[in-house]
Amino acid sequence: MTALILDGKQIAQKLRADWKLRADRLNALGIAPGLAVVMVGDNPASQVYVRNKIRACREIGIRSEEHLLGGDSTAETVLGVIDRLNADAGIHGILVQLPLPAQLVPSVVIERISPDKDVDGLHSRNLGSLLAGHPRFLPCTPAGIMEMLKSTGLDLRGKEAVVVGRSNIVGKPVALLLLQAGATVTLCHSQTRQLADHTRRADVLVSAVGKPGAIGGEMIKLGAVVIDVGINRSPNGKLVGDVDYGAARERAGWITPVPGGVGPMTIAMLLCNTILSAERHAAAQGIELKA
Ligand code: NDP
């Protein structure tokens, strides 16, 4: 069996066409959807991610602004910038690029973002709404994964889904979304015993570990949908996922490449959340958005 490729760029492109119409409609009404990206320090990988996000915003008609702060910035400085952006009516989404330098506590910074502008969906209020089953903003990577699964046409009800990795950004929220979609979900992590016994049962396998080779081909059920979230730098400088792609392609039914899989979908969902936030802002002002 050779797996079909779940091409994140292609799926994102299709979704973006619809969102561009929504952004155009907002712009025509004088509400320019606005995203602020806050980056602290000069982590090279973060610089690339931020550049890609800014470019994607431009393409779709979202106004974006970058707030680049020195790597030695204090919590007071960073929180001050977030406070100003929270109060800025022209900004509908605020994203703080992670990771943050060691002197900053990520949860403190994220909790300072207004939940109404938390387009990354990581504020505890938004994660809580997700848990309760009425999410306002879905975290971008998990939401992108669900869109990819939707594109396969697979009915998730009753399927075995195994998620490897339990971060607040990826593992836990994607497990919740899979659960809400009717899958039977197993959430694995570094303390899980006999990981392969779990992964081999998975009709849907999501790996968000951050270690190349974490998922070998023999750990995959024949015909499974394999979503590789990991982004790792191999010793020869190439970007690779967590999954042994060559071996996995021979067993999976569907597989995401790295790069070009989950990454573009994460950016796409950020655009979606920003437009959604601007639409809510318009509705709160009594502006009617006709379809
Ligand atoms: P974290 O480091 O926060 O979480 C990693 C998880 O993997 C932890 O839950 C950890 O377990 C688990 N883990 C570590 N080693 C093993 C192991 N040997 N077996 C099973 N589980 C293990 O990472 P993130 O969730 O933030 O990111 C994961 C990966 O996804 C990274 O490579 C990151 O770069 C990438 N990423 C990609 C995105 C995209 O858009 N494509 C977006 C976000 C992340 P424990 O909790 O017990 O420590």
Image (cartoon, rainbow, N blue to C red):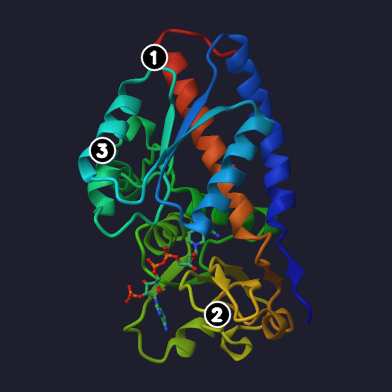
For marks 1 and 3, give the CA distance: 30 Å
In primary-sequence order, the first of circles 3 and 2 is 3
Please name the residue that numbered disc 3 is placed on. Answer: 77
Mark 2: amino acid: Pro
| Some atom of ligand 1 lies within 8 Å of the CB belonging to the residue at label 2 | no
Quadrant containing ligand 1 reads bottom left
Q: Is residue 70 left or right of residue 5?
A: left
Q: Residue at x 43, y 7 (%)?
A: 286
Observer-nearest residue: 155 or 242? 242
Where the C terminus falls, by quadrant?
A: top right
Circle 2 SS class: loop
| Some atom of ligand 1 lies within 8 Å of the CB belonging to the residue at label 3 | no
Mark 3: amino acid: Thr
Q: For the residues carrying marks 1 and 3, which lies nearer the camera in this image?
A: 3
Circle 1 SS class: helix
Please name the residue that numbered disc 1 is placed on. Answer: 284
In primary-sequence order, the first of circles 1 and 3 is 3
Please name the residue that numbered disc 2 is placed on. Answer: 212
Mark 1: amino acid: Ala
| Some atom of ligand 1 lies within 8 Å of the CB belonging to the residue at label 1 | no
Q: Residue at x 71, y 62 (%)?
A: 6
Q: Is residue 122 left or right of residue 105?
A: right
Q: Residue at x 53, y 30 (%)?
A: 64
Depicted 88 relative to depicted 123: above or below = above
**Residue 35: x %, y % from top left:** 48, 31
**Pointer 2: residues within 10 angstroms few (<14), some, or many (20+)?**
some
In primary-sequence order, the first of circles 1 and 2 is 2
Q: Are marks 1 and 2 in contact (CB under 8 Å)?
A: no
Depicted 267 relative to depicted 275: above or below = below
